[in-house]
Image: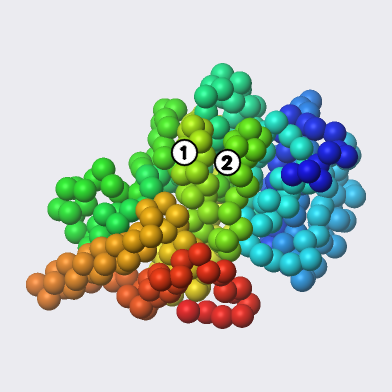
Amino acid sequence: MNDQTHRSSVVLSCVIVNYRTPGFLIDCLPGLLAELSGLSARIVIVDNHSADQSVTILRDWIRQHDTEARIDLIESPHNHGFASGNNIGIRYQPAELYLLLNSDTLIRPGAIRTLLDSAKQHPQAGLFSPRLEWPDGKGQESCFRYHSPVSEFTDAARTGFLSRLFAGWQVPLPVQTAPCAPQWTSFACVMIRDQVIREAGLLDEGYFMYFEDVEFCHRARRHGWPVRHEPTARVVHLRGGSSPVKTDLAQKKRPPRYYYESRARYFFQVHGRTGPLLANLAWTAGRLVSWLRQLAGRADMSAPDRQWADIWIHWHTPMKSYTHPAKARP
């Protein structure tokens, strides 16, 4: 972060990574700018080598609407993923707090100040997350427990009895109505103290996309910085706008190779050398339970296409560099 020294520090730097989503981002920016009025804050947009008209469209919009000159637009010469793009933005502008924000979000009034107030009132917390919701106000899951071999087993088994038996290991938490301290939170919108980044490091660029948020939260907690969730801060997340992977998983379509590479890296970093193997064996055992239920005439709770094979991607070389999505699929 040494290259920040020539820029004046602000209280809040909002970092948004764009990859071929200028329309979503243009919808996001007016509400965000309104929220930053009167604050010591800037917006850093990192275009992750979209190689389309994104930069031209965004530059034109900024020229016409950024009357207070709060927005910086950075063109990355490459697309090395979500973590890399956010790190470029974090390095660019020194700040006390960083708001990492997806391009497919809309800020509800008061959300930013609520998170800032929480940061002041709870100095022991290092990350602050809002309630994510759909445009109609219905809440989205945004608070989670860590992925574990047990959660892999229950997720693959998809059996009510086992889900209840191992409820304490289920990854998604119910939509929260009161402040809480989840093990990790969605990075669709999260505020992070600069001190956390200085102590725990930047996002791990070994992840192209997915699992970098849970790994960062795990690393921050190891350094004594828990997450605080503030449900009165509300942010609309148009899930799937910036990436189709979650939609693909929900529809049982085959995710891209980098998803499984990230999964293997996470289980190695968080659960140790045997983590990827244990997670895969647990998933396979759970899938066997699901198959047995099918033989007994129960509904087919199928997994995403070819997941039985794809989970073994990088399991024995989990720290190997990811495969760029432009070059290969599973």
The residue depicted at 73 percent of the width and 52 percent of the height is: 88
Asked whether 71 or 83 is in front, the reply is: 83
Where is the N terminus found, in terms of image quarters? top right
Residue beneath disc 2: 200
Q: What residue type is disc 1 on?
A: Arg
The residue at the point 52 percent across, 28 percent down is: 125
**Residue 218 in the image: above or below residue 287:** above
- Asked if residue 67 shows in the view, the reply is yes
Q: Is residue 82 above or below residue 112?
A: below
Q: Secondary structure at mark 2?
A: helix
Q: Is residue 27 left or right of residue 224?
A: right
Q: Position of residue 258 (x, y in %)?
A: 52, 69
Residue drawn 40% across the image and 70% down it: 315
Work out whether mark 1 precedes mark 2 in sequence or the reverse, and give the earlier one.
2
Residues packed near mark 2 inside 10 Å, few (<14), some (14 to 19) or many (20 plus): some
Query: Quarter-wise, where is residue 68 in the image?
Result: top right
Q: Name the side, left or right, on which 156 lies relative to 58.
A: left
Residue 80 in the image: state x and y as whole percent. 66, 65
Q: Secondary structure at mark 1?
A: helix
Q: Quickly name the residue at label 1.
A: 222
**Could you tell whether 168 is left or right of 202 in the image?**
left
- Frontmost residue, 200 versus 81: 200
Give the vertical position of 26 relative to 330 (above or below): above
Q: Position of residue 127 (x, y in %)?
A: 55, 35
Q: Is residue 36 above or below residue 241?
A: above
In this view of the protein, can residue 301 be seen by the observer?
A: no
